[in-house]
Image (cartoon, rainbow, N blue to C red):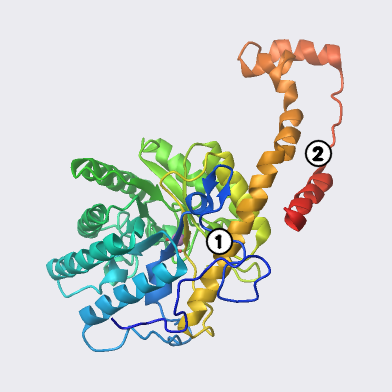
């Protein structure tokens, strides 16, 4: 079989922090136990198909730049098969347990839907065989409902019921192939489920349609006995000016309004959080605190650029606090860390894909170790417990238990007078975090 990544002849190994080998892990040691689980079990790394193997570095101003050895030839299905070979060679050499894809990543759309579905059946048969041979699993599948012109005004929120129906037909097939590949989840990302101008938009009706669409998906999931977890992925804008899945909080409100809370969790993407004006950790915390933290698209943005740069994660504060929060809420169940990230346009060589993923995996592995130490020491947890201790007794407990109202609180305040000022100790806590970053 053709080798597509000859620069990496053997699987990437863990060589420890002193290694000078750029193609070795310094921190990620898959089998090493941390807080009772292996690193691989905690982190559940996945490679995304679209950025890693399909998009070639084109941007709004320029053509693709990247050398894709498997994307040669005239027959689109031969290219699809070669891409699949390259992908599984890459997953195996990198040592990740999972992959993720959109339907249109694994085969190009044909002239008719029936023909596209045939192509999907063919390629997923090959993918299933590869999964069996390598033990690599599908973290989640999804359906591209944003690239084709038919979806220019949305899919489930399109003003035309015919487009709604077309989108449903595509998602039906995407659910079937995800189930066939034993996917552990399925993601809904509403890239064009939003609007460009309110002058032509019936927002209330569009939201109702999105709710209906997701209910139909839940019904079909039950019908075909697909056991994977459904997620929606918040993002505030881009490609549309406003997207209805704006952030974790607006997704939660939507799920509550349309009675979908038990059926969907969130797939939080780091830079989508920043684009919404939050931190990545805020989004994780909000989802965790409301019981809807499902999976993560691990990447980062550039604070100087207001768009979705999808860069590989390299920030230890982010990875440490992300893992701290994920562990706080019980760790991943069906979800994982999917690198929804792409190389910079000038990183043109296939080996650059390895450098990017190795660095990102190391950064999360180190983040995991830091988070584990923070949990073991319980320092931050103690500070928070202490800060809210007033609610465990006396008037605080009575408020939480619903035993008092404004009159009792007035009596309490009149008796006690001015409340005490208690320092939040932010700088001390930031220093404490730094001591973990420096040497955990
Ligand atoms: C786009 C994005 C998507 C979803 C899957 O910003 O993040 O790739 O993750 O459709
Ligand atoms: Co994403």
The residues tagged by marks 2 and 1 sit, at their Cα atoms, a distance apart of 28 Å
Q: Which residue is mark 2?
A: 424
115 shown above or below 333: below
The image quadrant that residue 263 belongs to is: top left
Give the mark nearer the N terminus: 2 vs 1: 1
Which mark, by number, is residue 271?
1
Question: Percent position (x, y) of residue 378?
Answer: 71, 37
Q: Residue at x 28, y 48 (%)?
A: 213
Of residues 201 and 246, the one nearer the viewer is 246
Of residues 115 and 92, the one nearer the viewer is 92
298 shown above or below 385: below
Q: Is residue 28 left or right of residue 159?
A: right
Question: Percent position (x, y) of residue 265?
Answer: 42, 44
Whether residue 281 is visible here, answered yes or no, is no
Q: Is residue 335 left or right of residue 363?
A: left
Of residues 25 and 345, the one nearer the viewer is 25
């Amino acid at each position: 079989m053709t080798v597509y990544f000859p620069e990496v002849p053997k699987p990437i190994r863990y060589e420890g922090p002193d290694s000078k080998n750029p193609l070795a892990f310094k921190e990620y040691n898959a089998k090493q136990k941390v807080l009772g689980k292996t690193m691989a079990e905690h982190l559940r790394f996945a490679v995304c198909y679209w950025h890693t193997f399909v998009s070639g570095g084109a941007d709004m101003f320029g053509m693709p730049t990247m050398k894709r050895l498997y994307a040669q030839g005239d027959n689109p299905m031969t290219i699809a098969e070669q891409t699949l070979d390259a992908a599984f060679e890459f997953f195996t050499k990198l040592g990740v347990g999972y992959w993720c894809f959109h339907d249109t990543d694994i085969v190009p759309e044909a002239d008719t839907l029936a023909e596209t579905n045939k192509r999907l059946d063919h390629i997923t048969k090959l993918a299933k065989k590869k999964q069996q041979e390598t033990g690599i699993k599908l973290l989640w599948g999804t359906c591209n409902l944003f690239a084709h012109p038919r979806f220019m005004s949305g899919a489930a929120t399109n003003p035309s019921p015919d487009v709604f129906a077309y989108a449903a037909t595509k998602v039906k097939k995407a659910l079937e192939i995800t189930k066939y590949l034993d996917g552990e989840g399925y993601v809904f990302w509403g890239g064009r489920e939003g609007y460009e101008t309110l002058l032509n938009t019936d927002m209330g009706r569009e939201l109702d349609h999105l709710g209906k669409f997701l209910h139909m998906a839940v019904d079909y999931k039950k019908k075909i006995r697909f056991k994977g977890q459904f997620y929606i992925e918040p993002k505030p804008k881009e490609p549309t000016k406003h997207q209805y899945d704006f952030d974790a909080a607006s997704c939660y409100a939507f799920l509550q309004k349309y009675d979908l809370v038990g059926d969907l969790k969130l797939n939080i993407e780091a830079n989508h959080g920043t684009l919404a004006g939050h931190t990545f950790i805020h989004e994780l915390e909000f989802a965790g605190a409301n019981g809807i933290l499902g999976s993560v698209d691990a990447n980062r943005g550039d604070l100087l650029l207001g768009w979705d740069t999808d860069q590989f994660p390299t920030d230890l504060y982010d990875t440490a606090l992300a893992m701290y929060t994920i562990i706080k809420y019980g760790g991943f169940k069906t979800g994982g860390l999917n690198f929804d990230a792409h190389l910079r346009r000038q990183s043109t060589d296939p080996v650059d894909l390895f450098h990017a993923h190795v660095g990102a995996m190391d950064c999360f592995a180190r983040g995991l170790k830091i988070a584990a130490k923070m949990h073991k020491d319980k320092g931050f947890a103690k500070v928070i417990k202490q800060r809210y201790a007033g609610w465990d007794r006396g008037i605080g407990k009575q408020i939480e238990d619903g035993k008092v109202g404004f009159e009792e609180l007035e009596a309490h305040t009149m008796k006690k007078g001015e409340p005490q000022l208690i320092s939040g100790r932010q700088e001390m806590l930031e220093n404490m975090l730094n001591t973990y970053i420096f040497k955990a």
